[in-house]
Image (cartoon, grey):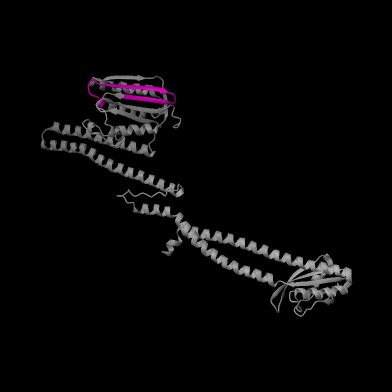
């Protein structure tokens, strides 16, 4: 369980959140600590410089004797443990000082004196007093031409303040780490709840049950969009599975009929072993039914490859008007046999970039259906024209028509309405036609009224710019 938690995105995001928050807080605390230390040191240095200015003024007015008295008075006033004063000759010899019992371990720094003499500006240094383990800030400054003031002040209060600040910092950092970890974990878990819901839904889905859907929060955020996308994918998968099941049932039904016929022909021939004509009839019928099966299988393969984008369509400049005119002439005898009035109005010189064989196959399937399902003395009309950037091919008949509830289903593979099952067919013609038209970036629409006829309209983009 621990191993799984450590590998989760929530755990890693919590670590990142905690780490970033801790680093930012640490930088803020350190910056504040540095500014506080600098401010305290600047204030102490200014106080020491003010003391040096006092000594300079007293020496100019009362001489070195006045400076001696000032050193004692100032030390007593501020507290002998808080500040001390020494007056030195440039050689380092002490000629006056405040009470130094507390500051006896503070000696004159030769390096500081040398730096003061060379640079001619006040020298500051911070030292540690061994006996008290405290720090002191020391100033060396000229207060007269031949007199140097060494003064120092204890940094006890500032040290305590910074020490207290460090303790507060450590405690605050501990609280920040714990707080950021807990709050980060809660926030990340809440943010990831949508992903958890999607994962749970995906785990609950099986091959036999695709009804589960991810609930949407309504926040319209990324996770809500992911849930919508996931649900749409499940809807598509469910529709595909349902389509596959229906197609499998239809395939089984449509394959059963020709196979049963082949078997029946064989049984008839076996019961008439001495009749050679029966064997020939059986062979002829078997070839016919086998061709029908092969045509069905090949059509299924064309549809599947085209829908998957794997079918090799050969697009080239095609005279659409001539192609449709030839197809109409080919079907004219079939319409004449049924005494059907067959009219066609085709606008001349319509050129299109298309796969001529595939497009001819799609048109022929629609025209064949129009003639097949139109009774004797009926009418079939074909109209082709170009308008703006669209080419329209309209096939209208006065046949049996299609019920409204079947209009969308007739383009599904192997689907056949009850009214059409009396005629020969595989239920693949319309599906193939629509697939071919879609590959040419066109559409197939149908309007129909039972008992009055149907109108199939194919629209194709002129010159097929998308295909080119």
Q: Is residue 359 above or below residue 130?
A: above
- At a point 71% along the width and 71% down the height, the residue shown is 155
- Tell me the residue at 21%/31% (across/down): 422
Provide residue 127's location: percent of width, then percent of height. Answer: 73, 72
Quadrant in the rendering for residue 387? top left
Could you tell me which quadrant the C terminus lies in? Answer: top left
Q: Observer-nearest residue: 318 or 307? A: 307
Which image quarter: residue 100? Answer: bottom right
Quadrant showing the N terminus = bottom left
Task: Provide residue 354's location: percent of width, then percent of height.
Answer: 40, 29
Magenta stretch secondary structure, dominant: strand
Where residue 443 sits, quadrant-wise, is top left
Residue sitting nearer the eye, 428 or 150: 150
Q: Residue at x 84, y 75 (%)?
A: 69
Q: Residue furthest front?
A: 77
Q: Is residue 143 visible?
A: no
Residue 428 covered by magenta stretch: no
Tally of marks: 0
Task: Look at the picture and state if 307 lies above or below 89.
Answer: above
Region rendered in magenta: 371-395
299 or 115, nearer to the observer: 115
Q: Does residue 377 show up magenta in the picture?
A: yes
Question: Residue 101, how many percent across, how many down?
Answer: 76, 80
**Looking at the image, which is closer to me, 251 or 151?**
151
Seen at 57% across and 68% down, the residue is 171
156 lies above or below 467:
below
- Residue 434: where, in percent of width, then height? 34, 32
Is residue 320 in sight in this rendering?
A: yes
């Amino acid at each position: 369980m621990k191993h799984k938690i450590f590998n989760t995105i929530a755990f890693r995001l919590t670590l990142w959140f905690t780490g970033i928050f801790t680093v930012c807080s640490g930088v803020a605390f350190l910056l504040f600590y540095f500014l506080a230390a600098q401010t305290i040191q600047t204030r102490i240095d200014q106080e020491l410089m003010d003391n040096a200015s006092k000594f300079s003024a007293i020496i100019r007015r009362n001489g070195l004797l006045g400076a001696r008295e000032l050193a004692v008075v100032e030390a007593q006033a501020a507290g002998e443990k808080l500040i001390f004063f020494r007056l030195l000759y440039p050689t380092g010899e002490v000629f006056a000082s405040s009470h130094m019992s507390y500051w006896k371990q503070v000696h004159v720094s030769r390096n500081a004196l040398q730096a003061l003499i060379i640079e001619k500006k006040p020298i500051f240094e911070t030292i540690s007093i061994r006996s008290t383990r405290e720090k002191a800030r020391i100033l060396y400054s000229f207060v007269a031409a031949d007199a140097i003031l060494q003064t120092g002040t204890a940094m006890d209060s500032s040290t305590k303040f910074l020490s207290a600040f460090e303790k507060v910092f450590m405690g605050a950092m501990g609280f920040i780490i714990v707080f950021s970890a807990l709050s980060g974990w809660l926030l990340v878990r809440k943010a990831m709840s949508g992903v958890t819901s999607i994962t749970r839904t995906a785990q609950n889905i099986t091959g036999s049950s695709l009804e589960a859907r991810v609930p949407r929060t309504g926040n319209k955020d990324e996770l809500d969009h992911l849930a919508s996308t996931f649900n749409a994918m499940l809807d598509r998968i469910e529709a595909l599975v349902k389509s596959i099941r229906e197609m499998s049932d239809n395939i089984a039904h449509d394959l059963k009929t020709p196979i049963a016929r082949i078997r029946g022909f064989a049984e008839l021939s076996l019961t008439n072993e001495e009749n050679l004509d029966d064997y020939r009839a059986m062979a002829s019928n078997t070839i016919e039914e086998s061709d029908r099966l092969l045509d069905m299988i090949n059509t299924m393969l064309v549809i599947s490859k085209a829908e998957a984008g794997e079918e090799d369509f050969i697009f080239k400049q095609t005279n659409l008007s001539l192609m449709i005119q030839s197809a109409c002439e080919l079907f004219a005898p079939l319409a004449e046999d049924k005494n059907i009035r067959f009219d066609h109005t085709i606008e001349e010189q319509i050129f299109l970039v298309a796969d001529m064989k595939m497009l001819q196959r799609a048109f022929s399937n629609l025209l064949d259906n129009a003639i097949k399902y139109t009774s004797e003395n009926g009418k079939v009309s074909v109209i082709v024209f170009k308008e703006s950037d669209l080419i329209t091919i309209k096939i209208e008949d006065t046949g049996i028509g299609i019920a409204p509830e079947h209009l969308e289903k007739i383009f599904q593979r192997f689907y056949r309405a009850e009214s059409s099952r009396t005629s020969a067919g595989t239920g693949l013609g319309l599906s193939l036609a629509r697939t071919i038209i879609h590959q040419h970036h066109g559409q197939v629409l149908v309007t129909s009224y039972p008992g009055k006829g149907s109108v199939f309209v194919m629209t194709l983009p002129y010159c097929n710019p998308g295909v080119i």
